[in-house]
Image (cartoon, helix red, strand yellow):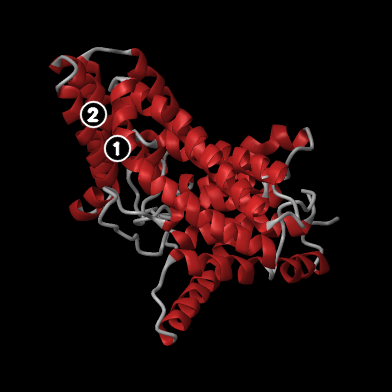
Amino acid sequence: MLTSLHIEGNSWLHRLPVRAKLLTLVALSILLFLSGSLPVQLTAFVISGGLYLSVGLSWREALKRVGFVFFTIIFLAAVNLFLLPLSEVSVLTLRLMALVLFAAAVTATTTIGAFMDEITVLLTPLERLGWVRAADVSLALGLVLRFVPDIFARYQAIREAHRARGLPVRPLTIIGPLVILTLKDADTIAAAIDARGFRRQ
Amino acid sequence: MNTRDLVLIALFAAIVVVLGLIPPITLGFIPVPITAQSMGVMLAGCILGAKRGALAFLLFLLLVAIGLPVLSGGRGGLAVFAGPSGGFILGWVVATFVTGLIAQRFVREGQPEVRQFVGFFLASIIGGIVVLYAIGMPWVSAVTGTPFITVATGSLAFLPGDILKAAIATLAARAVFAGYPLLHVRA
């Protein structure tokens, strides 16, 4: 149900450290937003697209992943054509597509573990201030991954209960029981975590 | 933060993931399909309150950012932040916080039912629609270059659906508030 968008592989982008990839993404965003030149945007678009297609995704999967965002970009570009000069629309559209493709390439070549390591590093200053604990973030993340299948099973059970009574399956009548049943477990789960001393409090 | 709050935040983020797996409903008189996940902002604010609601959404966005396809329709990854709707997605955290603040301020236990409904509805409208659009629309305009007024006009298509979502979230949040109140527990 929760399969990461990471793709196994050994491309150049796979081997690059996460930090370098994220910094490049940030630098690329700033650079492309500062530059209004069409050749720069076109180059970035071609390079990002090339990188994205070289990470080992099938054409179908590659298109599926960016399809929805591209649909929005193209739709807004079509609107822009009526309002702005063509050269400006091309710059705006290519810039966004380049960034989306590069971001998708970073996502496809980075494991969840690598991202989490980087987040732990990023959280260190906040941890020093006593605002947040990196271990808590990992714990919360683990809890989500652990409980999504349970909550989905609960949703299906409530849906079946609706059908058994001949009621239409509507969000309104499903969300209430789903939320109450799920959150009522919080005390038990919290007690189990504390009993095992995971948070060392 | 105590362990119970941490667990509540994680469970709510998981609920938002599951809401994304529920098939969207299409209504004849509304141009865009309604996804249960987009109700999450209003629900998180009205059920968990400002701080825990916003943290639940921050955790959810973390899942998106590290490459889990948890957005409705199986989307995810850094690409969604780079796209035109990135502002709406990042705005969820602020919108949840504001929804929670208003709900905590105006809804009390022991109030007449109608006042609780009004409180939750106002919180959902102001936080989940006004604040969210105030962040999302300028972002779309800044990123795509489409003039703000055009973006704002286009966004009107989403308004009827959003008001309906606020109504559903109000009823659901009030049901949870009656059955298992969490809104005012100190975070």
On-image quarter of the C terminus of chain A: bottom right
Where is residue A117? Give x, y as percent. 59, 45
Whether residue B45 appears in this view of the structure is no
**Which kind of residue does numbered mark 2 sit on?**
Phe
Where is residue A125? Give x, y as percent. 71, 32
Judging by the rendered image, the residue that carries numbered circle 1 is A101
Pick the front one: A100 or A20: A100
Few, some or many residues within 10 Å of mark 1 (<14, 14–19, 20+): many
Examine the rendered structure and indicate whether residue B185 appears above or below residue A194: above
Query: Could you tell which of marks 2 and 1 lies nearer the N-terminus?
Result: 2
Where is residue A197? Give x, y as percent. 82, 63
Q: Seen in the image, is A24 located left or right of residue A154? A: left
Chain letter of the residue carrying label 2: A
Pick the front one: A198 or A78: A78
Q: Seen in the image, is B15 located left or right of residue B102? A: left
Q: Residue furthest bottom?
A: A164
What residue sits 27% from the left and 52% below the top?
B29
The reply to whether callout 2 and callout 1 are in contact (CB within 8 Å) is yes
What residue sits 25% from the left and 56% below the top?
B28
Where is residue A149? Give x, y as percent. 51, 71
Hey, which quadrant is residue B170 in on the image?
bottom right
Q: Seen in the image, is B18 located left or right of residue B83? A: right
Chain letter of the residue carrying label 1: A
Hey, which quadrant is residue B54 in on the image?
top right
Judging by the rendered image, the residue that carries numbered circle 2 is A45
